[in-house]
Amino acid sequence: IQMTQSPSSLSASVGDTVTITCRASQGIFNSLAWYQQRPGQVPKLLIHAASRLGSGVPSRFSGSGSGTDYTLTIRSLQPEDFATYYCQQYYTLPPLTFGGGTEVEIK
Amino acid sequence: EVQLVESGGGLVRPGGSLRLSCVASGFTLSASDMNWVRQVPGRGLQWISYIGSDDTVHYADSVKGRFTISRDNAKNSLFLEMNSLRVDDTATYHCARDGFDVLTDSTFHAFDLWGRGTTVIISS
């Protein structure tokens, strides 16, 4: 299953709402995770099952979608949210596949 | 503290071999489903291999037949034996644990714990 993320990068300001999309090449039945990776750090699991927030993840992060199309929304962007975000499908194993990433930069 | 620590990376010539290790602390590795994921600096993530608590193993096509995942329960450690290494295997290799959903009391194949990684460079 191929995962296509868009956009590959975006510029936003503190306080903005940003939306990142991920499209699977076939239906993945909400078996989708989102990760945040800050520079020099390992990925952090934000969301699994398309919309379930991970432990300790702020409520300004939310996930939605179904079928092949999924969305990560970050409301009221904070300075610590500037990072690269990845989606990952886990409907099929093997393989597990990631999207290409979206870099969220400060405008 | 719950953590994963990898080691074993290095500089190897094409065609060579390496054995990566990942030591778990704060949890029982044998009871967990574990993975290796690699990342080329500045680029994306690629899942490489999986070993389940039931010893089921899976590999990405790009490494099948060359890499072997294994586990030593007594040492609470995960391994990745890498043979016939190629230039495009150059990356930072992370071990990662499958997540556990407390509401459904089940695991899922996304990763809630990552090690910091060990760097593998394949070059002549």
Image (tube, grey):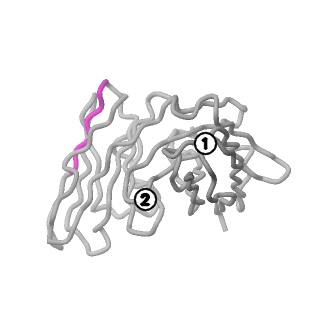
Asked which quadrant contains residue B59, the reply is top right
Q: Does the image show residue B102?
A: no
Above or below for A34 versus A79: above
Residue at 71%, 47% in the rendered image: B79
Kind of residue at disc 1: Leu
Residue at 18%, 73% in the rendered image: A14
> For this view, does B103 lie left or right of residue A48?
right
Q: In the structure shown, which secondary structural element does the residue marked by tag 1 occupy? A: loop
Look at the image and give the residue range highlighted in magenta.
Answer: A20-26
Kind of residue at disc 2: Pro
> For this view, does B53 lie left or right of residue A49?
right
Specify the farthest residue to the right.
B74
Do callouts 2 and 1 point to residues on the same chain? yes
From the image, tell me which residue sits under label 1: B85
* Label 2, residues with CA under 10 Å away: few <14, some 14-19, many ≥20: few
Q: Are marks 2 and 1 in contact (CB under 8 Å)?
A: no
Q: Position of residue B12 (x, y in %)?
A: 63, 53
The label on residue B41 is: 2
Residue at 19%, 52% in the rendered image: A19
Q: Chain of mark 2?
A: B
Q: Earlier in the sequence, mark 2 or mark 1?
A: 2
Residue at 57%, 45% in the rendered image: B98
Above or below for B75 versus A71: below
